[in-house]
Image (cartoon, rainbow, N blue to C red):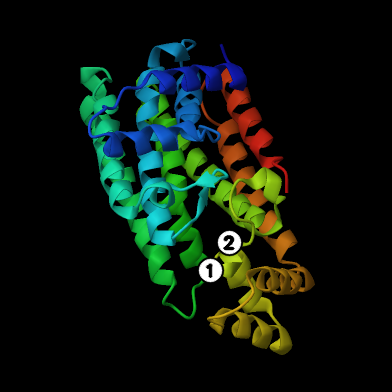
Amino acid sequence: MTDIKSLQNLIGGEIAQLQFGEDPQELYEPITYILSLGGKRMRPLLVLLGYQLVKEDPESIVRQSLAVEVFHNFTLMHDDIMDEAPLRRGKPTVHEKWNSTVAILSGDTMLVKAYDLLLEVRPEILAETIRQFNKCAVEVCEGQQIDMNFESQDVVSIDAYINMIRLKTAVLLGFSLEYGALLGGMSEPNRKKLYEIGVKMGIGFQLMDDLLDVYADQSKFGKQVGGDIISNKKTFLLIKALELANPSQKIQLDEWIDKNEFDAAEKVQAVTAIYDEIGIKELTSELMNQYFDESFALLDSLEARESGKATLKGFAEQLMKREK
């Protein structure tokens, strides 16, 4: 079994069977709710794809792969509170549907449940699994804090931004691939290379998300289009625009950034128009593709099953063609 759809069905079926608890209802219902919102299930899928680089029976590790999905959704639940986000995958976020206190406690419970799933790995690789997971989990928190620090910084460099998304988003994709390969018995040098492949892909995916936040079709995106512009989020697009803007464009951007009261749709339209004048969409696509190309070059040189490499590359290419 190597095709993506079959693997996603395996993951979906296993998620539906997860039991977290029933009482108090307010603690457990939000966990079921956020996990039922779907999404690409990219992280557990990467675990299975990492495993398939070594072995042919991904169905044997589906339950262990869910540790990264439960952890990821815990981070989303808490991030949405910090970002005051109204929507997640087109539906109300947990803190909007319940409240922030419920979302904090449910998120905490999800983190503990992620460890329960990790504990199901073979005893001989348990210590290494937990060690790598802990490193990744702390880096995700570091990335989120750096992202929040950016809010109060007047100037953020491109390098600082790339490092932030590497920590906040990409390391979990790298860990997911490496975790799957570890479950499959891949050698450590190859696992480390695979981790780098996942990190580079992750940076590419986040740059794509930044791009889609501004240029996506709302009906297909699932989040508020233009949300990053409305909240002055220092994404690659805004940082690059401020760097390349002519004096007139710089004045306009600064005015929109400094305004406390504004019409959201008007702001999104005005800032997007400046991005268009500067060519920000093309520059973001160029950098995004550079990271994908680097990850594919590393993948080509990886010692692993060719069919597994082809499936992983196909999955990444499929995601790169998401609607813009």
Q: Which residue is mark 2?
A: 227
Task: Place residue 225 in its image quadrant.
Answer: bottom right
Residue located at (63% from left, 66% from top):
237
Q: Is residue 3 left or right of residue 43?
A: right
In this rendering, the answer to whether 258 lies above or below 169 is below
- From the top left corner, tell me how far across and down residue 271 is, in percent: 69, 73
In the image as oriented, which residue stretches furthest toward the right? 277
Does residue 65 appear left or right of residue 269 in this picture?
left
Distance between the alpha carbons at the discs numbered 1 and 2: 6 Å
Which one is in front, 240 or 293?
A: 240
**Quarter of the image where the N terminus is located:** top right
Amino acid marked by disc 2: Gly
Left/right placement of residue 6 relative to residue 127 reads right
Q: Residues within 10 Å of mark 1 (few under 14, many from 20)?
A: few
Q: Amino acid at mark 1?
A: Ser
Q: Which of the two residues, 137 or 90, is positioned nearer the viewer here?
A: 90
Residue 177 occupies quadrant = top left
Secondary structure under the numbered disc 2 in the rendered image = helix
Q: Could you classify mark 2 by the number of other residues whose Cα lies within 10 Å: few (under 14), some (14-19), or many (20 or more)? A: some
Question: Badges 1 and 2: C-beta atoms under 8 Å apart?
Answer: yes
Residue 189 position within the rendered picture, expressed as x and y whole percent measured from the top left: 39, 32
The quadrant where residue 187 appears: top left
The answer to whether 197 is drawn above or below residue 147 in the figure is: above
In this orientation, does residue 132 appear? no
> Whole-percent x and y of residue 95?
39, 51
- The picture places residue 2, in percent across and down from the top left corner, at 58, 15
Report the residue at 66% width, 60% height from top.
Answer: 214
| Residue occupied by mark 1 | 231
